Image: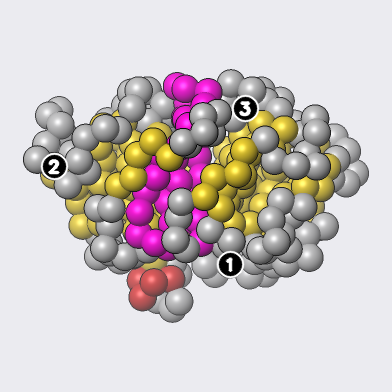
Amino acid sequence: MNVSKTPFNGYSVKFSPFYEDRLAVATAQNFGIIGNGRVHVFSLPPTPTGALTEIISFDTADGVYDLAWSESHDSLLIAAVADGSVKLFDTNLPPPQNPLRSFQEHTREVHGVDYNPTRRDSFVTASWDDTVKLWSLDRPASIRTFKEHAYCVYSVAWNPRHADVFASASGDCTVRVWDVREPGSTMIIPGHEAEILYCDWNKYDECLIATSSVDKSIRVWDVRNYRVPIASLNGHGFAVRKVKFSPHHRNLMMSCSYDMTVCMWDFMVEDSLVGRYDHHSEFAIGVDFNVLVEGLVASTGWDQMVFVWQHGTEPRGP
């Protein structure tokens, strides 16, 4: 169990794909409604107990809602900011030399960002302006804008096997699957009767996608036949803010909710809820699996807390 408290409210937490002991956290002042933002980069201590050590932090004029590590440069972070900007930070450079770039195209808050894990040269952003944009670090402007959603786009996720395919989750109650080589979306999944807040692809089966919604449920879909979900997971008391597939186990998922809990699920068994953690005292907003250390997970929330723990142990420690 490793813990840290941030000055602002936590929104997103991401483990580095390069260093097993490195973690980035996106935060926003005043619950993201108005005020500044800050990106923190923490180092995990060598022992399972102890405080996280801040390596560096970057201040922004507006709240930071999400972030993604570059898959090609171990020190680069991309931040989704409430002022509509997308900012690139280099953790090897001091704050006065950051951000390296600031892309200003979205006309409303940028709520999600995901870096392409297979091609490793591009990333996508989701915005409350109802669009998704495709970017490359070597271009000054976006490569393309995807305009089909009828309401805010909250989340985007690249397919882990197909370098040109990503999905987007929207408040219009749909998930859309896109191929960047095609003019429009290739699939529309009417996933829930309420806003869809997040989507993620299974890391072992490229045809499975999970969605989480304001309707308090998580659903798992097979894109080969998406008329009905292959699993519907109920157990949260309020909107499910995020859902992530494990990088180590095909059937394991983690979610966080406005009910202040983080839950673990095995979507292939009848009693699918396999773990519930109630260590947050406010909305639980961000969760992540460490891709380099099996079972190591992190969460953050509006209580300004960041927790890192081994699944199966108590996040708050003994």
Amino acid marked by disc 2: Gly
Instruction: Determine crowd level at label 3: few under 14, some 14-19, many 20+ residues with C-alpha closer than 10 A.
Output: many
Residue 279 is tagged as: none
Amino acid marked by disc 3: Pro
Point out residue 97 in the picture as x, y percentages from the top left corner.
38, 51
Residue position for label 1: 109
SS state under label 2: loop
Q: Residue at x 43, y 40 (%)?
A: 273
Say which label, 3 or 2, has the lower sequence index.
Answer: 3
* Residue closest to the eye, 167 or 17: 167
Point out residue 116 in the picture as x, y percentages from the top left corner.
61, 33
Is any atom of residue 306 visible in this view? no
Residue position for label 2: 317
Looking at the image, the residue that sits furthest to the bottom is 34
- 244 versus 98 height, above or below: above
SS state under label 3: loop
Q: Main secondary structure of the magenta part?
A: strand
Residue 160 is tagged as: 3
Range of the magenta residues?
Answer: 239-266
* Relative to 19, 67 lies left or right: right
Residue 256 on the magenta segment:
yes
Instruction: Tell me the distance, in whole angstroms, between the alpha carbons under discs 3 and 1.
Output: 26 Å
Instruction: Tell me the distance, in whole angstroms, between the alpha carbons under discs 3 and 2.
Output: 33 Å
- 141 versus 117 height, above or below: below
Instruction: Tell me the distance, in whole angstroms, between the alpha carbons under discs 2 and 1.
Output: 36 Å
